[in-house]
Image (cartoon, rainbow, N blue to C red):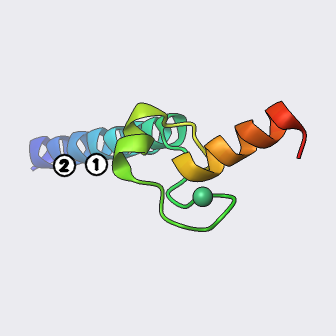
Amino acid sequence: MSDEVDVAQDVVELTNTVAVQAVRHQLRTSGRDVCQSCGEAIPAARRLAAPWAATCLLCQSRLEHRNKVGY
Ligand SMILES: [Zn+2]
């Protein structure tokens, strides 16, 4: 009986550990699903290529253009 309880506790602890690690990994690697600028969904390919990206490719290039030319 106590063995079963021990095993159950181990499973609960392991599950919690895995869940915490998954959340931490998600926080570390995920940027945003939605473009901060236009509100459109950021394509999965861009999120994979640049997980920190907060804008879609179009808005990013607009921002870079604006920074470069000043308007
Ligand atoms: Zn955008």
Do residues under tags 2 and 1 come within 8 Å of each other at their CB atoms? yes
* Tag 1 residue: 12
Question: Mark 2 is on which residue type?
Answer: Ala
On screen, residue 44 above or below 34: above
Residue at position x 64%, y 44% in the image: 60
Q: Secondary structure at mark 1?
A: helix
Disc 1, ligand 1: is the CB inside 8 Å?
A: no
On screen, residue 32 above or below 66: below
Mark 2 closeness class: few <14, some 14–19, many ≥20 residues within 10 Å: few
Between marks 2 and 1 in the image, the one whose residue lies nearer the viewer: 1
Please identify the quarter of the rendering in which residue 68 is found: top right
Please identify the quarter of the rendering in which residue 23 is found: top left
Residue 49 visible in the shown view: yes
Residue at position x 44%, y 36% in the image: 25
Q: CA distance from mark 2 to mark 1?
A: 6 Å
How many discs mark residues in the rendered view? 2
Question: Mark 1 is on which residue type?
Answer: Val
Q: Position of residue 18 (x, y in %)?
A: 32, 39
Residue 8, numbered label: 2
Q: Position of residue 65 (x, y in %)?
A: 74, 39
Nearest the eye: 68 or 7: 68
